[in-house]
């Protein structure tokens, strides 16, 4: 479809779908209950082998468009959704997560109040073991505005944006080439960071969604491959090449150090030796500070790492 032929809406909601039969109906209903009703929903069924497609089709609403493709991974599914979308802005949502009714209304307010930026996002909760938690938050609950030093902010709270809270201009996503296909980990954070470097992050601390960590853990937590988050590799290369804007270098370096350390801790906790070895090959790991941090990490009992991981979030319910 040509750009001229598009009957533009403000929002297209893009949902990649792969084997989420237990959640997709609830997820779609959370979108359809939005207080702002002018939007379309683009569900990309990425070769599901369970009844996800049938479940999605059971939710009848003219705003929902379902597209089938062979299994190609979440990035290819999101890219297909971006291609098919009619909206000026793409609001992303994972097929097992949930929006509260004011989610799109809040994003709409951010776009109207802070036009011309790269990423719009809101606060969220995390559902873990049936309990809702709030990620560590660096802003007051009333904050809305531009995140000026986003690498510094991300180093304190990566929860500022994720694949269920992010909203980006469609044209920006297309100009950046969309999501990197064939990547399993960290492909979304790479896109958020790349867009924010270009055009900044606007954030609201109002809780508008929840991230279903229970569903995510069942599918991802037992992975033993050696892949490390793509955004760490990309940022390591960007800093090492000297092409990152100087205004970002110091905070980006700190963000990368923290990201490497916490991911290394997670790999050690999961006994993922190959991923741990791969992450220590990044250029940043040659720094004396990070070498010392990783060496100290080897001395921490795994049980203590497990406890630390559990208490990264504050219990709110």
Image: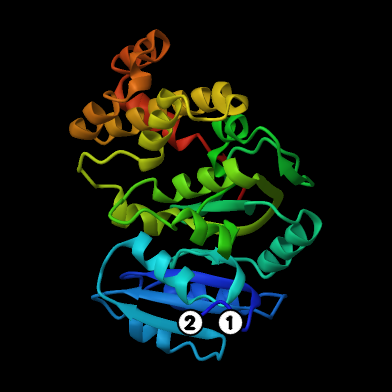
For label 1, the residue is 6
Q: Residue at x 34, y 21 (%)?
A: 283
Left or right placement of residue 38 versus residue 6 in this view: right
Specify which label sits upstream in the sequence, 1 or 2.
2
Q: For the image shown, how many numbered marks are present on the structure?
A: 2
The colour scheme used here is rainbow
Could you classify mark 1 by the number of other residues whose Cα lies within 10 Å: few (under 14), some (14-19), or many (20 or more)? Answer: few
Q: Is residue 264 above or below residue 125?
A: above
Q: Nearer the viewer, residue 195 or 201?
A: 195
Residue 282 drawn above or below residue 138: above
Residue 240 image-quadrant placement: top left
> Whole-percent x and y of residue 222?
25, 47
For the residue labelled by badge 1, is the local secondary structure a helix, a strand or a loop?
loop
Res 164 seen here: no
Where residue 166 appears, x then y in whole percent?
A: 57, 56
Determine the residue positioned at 77% across, 45% down.
Answer: 143
Disc ID at residue 1:
2
Q: Who is closer to the viewer here, 258 or 256?
A: 256
Residue 18 or 207: which is nearer the viewer? 18
**Residue 306, labelled with which disc?**
none
Q: Are marks 1 and 2 in contact (CB under 8 Å)?
A: yes
Q: Is residue 286 above or below residue 233?
A: above
Q: Position of residue 137 (x, y in %)?
A: 64, 38
Query: What distance separates the C-alpha of mark 1 from that of mark 2?
Result: 7 Å
Q: Residues within 10 Å of mark 2 (few under 14, many from 20)?
A: few
Q: Residue at 62%, 84% (x, y): give it.
A: 7
Vertical placement of residue 164 versus 272, above or below: below
SS class of the residue under badge 2? loop
* Residue 183, horizontal then vertical, whole percent: 30, 51
Q: For residue 99, say whether it is visible.
A: yes
């Amino acid at each position: 479809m040509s750009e001229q032929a598009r009957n533009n809406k403000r929002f297209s909601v893009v949902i990649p779908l792969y084997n989420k039969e237990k959640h997709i109906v609830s997820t779609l209903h959370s979108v359809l209950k939005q207080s702002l009703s002018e939007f379309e929903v683009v569900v990309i069924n990425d070769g599901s082998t369970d009844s996800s497609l049938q479940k999605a089709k059971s939710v009848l609403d003219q705003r929902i468009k379902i597209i089938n493709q062979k299994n190609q991974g979440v990035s290819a599914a999101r890219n297909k959704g971006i291609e098919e979308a009619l909206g000026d802005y793409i609001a992303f949502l994972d097929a097992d997560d949930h929006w509260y009714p004011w989610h799109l209304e809040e994003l709409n307010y951010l776009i109207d109040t802070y036009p011309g930026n790269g990423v719009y996002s809101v606060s969220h909760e995390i559902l873990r073991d049936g309990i809702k938690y709030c990620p560590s938050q660096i802003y007051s609950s009333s904050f809305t505005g531009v995140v000026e030093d986003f690498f510094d902010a991300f180093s304190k709270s990566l929860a500022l944006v994720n694949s269920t809270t992010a909203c980006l201009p469609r044209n920006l996503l297309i100009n950046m080439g969309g999501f990197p296909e064939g990547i399993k980990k960290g492909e979304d954070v790479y896109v958020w960071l790349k867009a924010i470097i270009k055009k900044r992050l606007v954030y609201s601390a109002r809780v508008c969604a929840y991230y279903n960590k229970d569903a995510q853990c069942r599918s991802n937590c037992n992975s033993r491959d050696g892949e490390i988050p793509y955004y760490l590799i990309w940022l390591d290369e960007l800093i090492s090449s000297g092409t990152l804007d100087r205004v970002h270098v110091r905070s980006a370096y700190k963000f990368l150090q923290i990201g490497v350390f916490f991911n290394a801790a997670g790999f050690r906790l999961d006994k993922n030796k190959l991923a741990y070895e791969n992450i220590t090959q990044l250029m940043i790991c040659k720094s004396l500070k990070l070498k010392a941090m990783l060496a100290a990490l080897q001395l921490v009992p795994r049980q203590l790492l497990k406890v630390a991981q559990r208490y990264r979030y504050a219990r709110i319910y």
